Image (cartoon, rainbow, N blue to C red):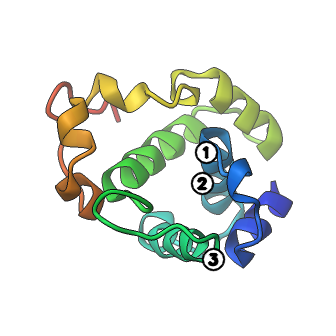
Amino acid sequence: MAVLGRQVLDGVLPKAQWTHRAHLAFAAWVIAARPDTVAARDMPGMIRAYNEATGTANTDTGGYHETITQASLRAITAFLSTQPDGMPLHARCNALFASPFGDQHWLLAHWSRGVLFSAAARRGWVEPDVRPLPF
Protein backbone atom coordinates (compact mmCIF):
# COMPACT_ATOMS: atom_id res chain seq x y z
CA MET A 1 0.00 0.00 0.00
CA ALA A 2 2.78 2.40 0.93
CA VAL A 3 4.57 1.64 -2.34
CA LEU A 4 1.47 2.56 -4.33
CA GLY A 5 1.00 5.68 -2.22
CA ARG A 6 4.59 6.83 -2.80
CA GLN A 7 4.31 6.11 -6.53
CA VAL A 8 1.20 8.28 -6.78
CA LEU A 9 2.73 11.06 -4.71
CA ASP A 10 5.95 10.91 -6.74
CA GLY A 11 3.98 10.87 -10.02
CA VAL A 12 5.62 7.65 -11.20
CA LEU A 13 2.77 5.12 -10.99
CA PRO A 14 2.18 4.05 -14.60
CA LYS A 15 -1.04 5.65 -15.79
CA ALA A 16 -2.44 2.24 -16.83
CA GLN A 17 -2.21 1.17 -13.17
CA TRP A 18 -4.27 4.16 -11.94
CA THR A 19 -7.43 2.03 -11.79
CA HIS A 20 -10.52 2.30 -9.61
CA ARG A 21 -8.91 -0.09 -7.13
CA ALA A 22 -5.71 1.94 -7.12
CA HIS A 23 -7.74 5.08 -6.38
CA LEU A 24 -9.45 3.27 -3.48
CA ALA A 25 -6.19 1.86 -2.12
CA PHE A 26 -4.44 5.22 -2.37
CA ALA A 27 -7.30 6.96 -0.56
CA ALA A 28 -7.39 4.26 2.14
CA TRP A 29 -3.64 4.64 2.64
CA VAL A 30 -3.91 8.42 2.91
CA ILE A 31 -6.81 8.14 5.38
CA ALA A 32 -5.35 5.34 7.52
CA ALA A 33 -1.59 5.74 7.30
CA ARG A 34 -0.91 9.43 6.75
CA PRO A 35 -1.75 11.29 9.98
CA ASP A 36 0.03 14.32 8.51
CA THR A 37 -2.78 14.78 5.99
CA VAL A 38 -6.45 15.68 5.96
CA ALA A 39 -7.72 13.57 3.08
CA ALA A 40 -10.63 15.80 2.05
CA ARG A 41 -8.35 18.81 1.94
CA ASP A 42 -5.09 17.28 0.66
CA MET A 43 -6.11 14.56 -1.80
CA PRO A 44 -7.40 16.93 -4.48
CA GLY A 45 -3.94 18.45 -4.83
CA MET A 46 -2.29 15.03 -4.71
CA ILE A 47 -4.50 13.69 -7.50
CA ARG A 48 -4.14 16.81 -9.63
CA ALA A 49 -0.35 16.66 -9.28
CA TYR A 50 -0.31 12.95 -10.18
CA ASN A 51 -2.49 13.63 -13.24
CA GLU A 52 -0.18 16.39 -14.42
CA ALA A 53 2.91 14.23 -13.86
CA THR A 54 1.40 11.51 -16.05
CA GLY A 55 0.24 13.82 -18.82
CA THR A 56 -3.43 14.06 -17.88
CA ALA A 57 -4.82 17.59 -17.94
CA ASN A 58 -7.21 18.58 -15.15
CA THR A 59 -10.04 20.15 -17.14
CA ASP A 60 -13.83 20.36 -17.19
CA THR A 61 -13.89 17.08 -19.13
CA GLY A 62 -10.97 15.07 -17.77
CA GLY A 63 -8.57 14.56 -14.92
CA TYR A 64 -9.46 15.46 -11.35
CA HIS A 65 -13.12 15.20 -10.30
CA GLU A 66 -14.11 16.86 -7.01
CA THR A 67 -17.49 15.22 -6.43
CA ILE A 68 -16.21 11.71 -7.14
CA THR A 69 -13.17 12.28 -4.93
CA GLN A 70 -15.08 13.71 -1.98
CA ALA A 71 -17.87 11.10 -2.18
CA SER A 72 -15.29 8.33 -2.39
CA LEU A 73 -13.38 9.70 0.60
CA ARG A 74 -16.60 9.77 2.62
CA ALA A 75 -17.40 6.20 1.58
CA ILE A 76 -13.91 4.90 2.31
CA THR A 77 -13.75 6.65 5.68
CA ALA A 78 -17.14 5.23 6.66
CA PHE A 79 -16.19 1.76 5.44
CA LEU A 80 -12.83 1.70 7.22
CA SER A 81 -14.52 2.73 10.47
CA THR A 82 -16.56 -0.51 10.36
CA GLN A 83 -13.51 -2.76 10.13
CA PRO A 84 -12.02 -4.43 13.23
CA ASP A 85 -9.34 -2.59 15.15
CA GLY A 86 -5.92 -3.95 14.36
CA MET A 87 -6.97 -5.34 10.98
CA PRO A 88 -4.06 -4.75 8.56
CA LEU A 89 -4.66 -2.05 5.97
CA HIS A 90 -4.23 -4.47 3.05
CA ALA A 91 -6.98 -6.68 4.51
CA ARG A 92 -9.26 -3.68 5.00
CA CYS A 93 -8.61 -2.72 1.37
CA ASN A 94 -9.46 -6.21 0.18
CA ALA A 95 -12.73 -5.95 2.10
CA LEU A 96 -13.31 -2.51 0.56
CA PHE A 97 -12.74 -3.94 -2.94
CA ALA A 98 -15.31 -6.69 -2.19
CA SER A 99 -17.86 -4.15 -0.91
CA PRO A 100 -20.30 -2.20 -3.10
CA PHE A 101 -17.68 0.60 -3.23
CA GLY A 102 -15.39 -1.75 -5.13
CA ASP A 103 -17.72 -1.35 -8.10
CA GLN A 104 -16.57 1.69 -10.02
CA HIS A 105 -20.19 2.55 -10.84
CA TRP A 106 -21.43 2.73 -7.22
CA LEU A 107 -21.85 6.51 -7.45
CA LEU A 108 -24.53 6.14 -10.13
CA ALA A 109 -26.89 4.85 -7.43
CA HIS A 110 -26.72 8.38 -5.98
CA TRP A 111 -26.16 10.69 -8.96
CA SER A 112 -27.60 10.66 -12.44
CA ARG A 113 -24.90 10.27 -15.09
CA GLY A 114 -25.54 13.78 -16.44
CA VAL A 115 -25.11 15.44 -13.05
CA LEU A 116 -22.15 13.32 -11.92
CA PHE A 117 -20.19 13.89 -15.10
CA SER A 118 -21.01 17.58 -15.42
CA ALA A 119 -18.33 20.25 -15.36
CA ALA A 120 -19.88 21.59 -12.15
CA ALA A 121 -19.44 18.23 -10.39
CA ARG A 122 -15.90 17.95 -11.68
CA ARG A 123 -15.01 21.44 -10.38
CA GLY A 124 -16.80 21.32 -7.00
CA TRP A 125 -19.04 19.31 -4.73
CA VAL A 126 -22.51 18.63 -6.15
CA GLU A 127 -25.11 16.97 -3.94
CA PRO A 128 -26.57 13.64 -5.10
CA ASP A 129 -29.68 14.03 -7.26
CA VAL A 130 -30.93 10.42 -7.17
CA ARG A 131 -30.48 9.24 -3.58
CA PRO A 132 -28.59 10.69 -0.59
CA LEU A 133 -25.34 9.10 0.46
CA PRO A 134 -25.87 6.70 3.39
CA PHE A 135 -23.04 8.14 5.50
Q: Nearer the viewer, mark 3 or mark 1?
A: 3
Amino acid type assigned to the residue bearing label 3 in the image: Ala
Instruction: Looking at this view, name the residue that lies furthest to the left.
Output: 129
Q: Quadrant of residue 87?
A: top right
- Residue 5, compared with residue 97, is above or below; it is below
Residue positioned 41% across, 69% down in the render: 58
* Disc on res. 81: none
The residue that mark 3 highlights is 53
Task: Report how far apart the C-alphas of labels 1 and 2 lie in the structure.
Answer: 5 Å
- In the visual, does 84 lie left or right of 76? right
Label 2: state its secondary structure. Answer: helix
The first of marks 2 and 3 along the sequence is 2
x, y percentage for residue 105?
Answer: 44, 27
Residue at x 39% of width, y 58% of height: 62
Residue 24, numbered circle: 1
Tags 1 and 2 in contact by the CB under 8 Å rule? yes
Tell me the amino acid under the disc marked 1: Leu
Quadrant location of the C terminus? top left
Q: Earlier in the sequence, mark 3 or mark 1?
A: 1
* Residue matched to label 2: 27
Q: Residue furthest front?
A: 55
Give me the C-alpha separation between circle 2 and circle 3: 18 Å
State the residue at coordinates (66%, 29%).
97
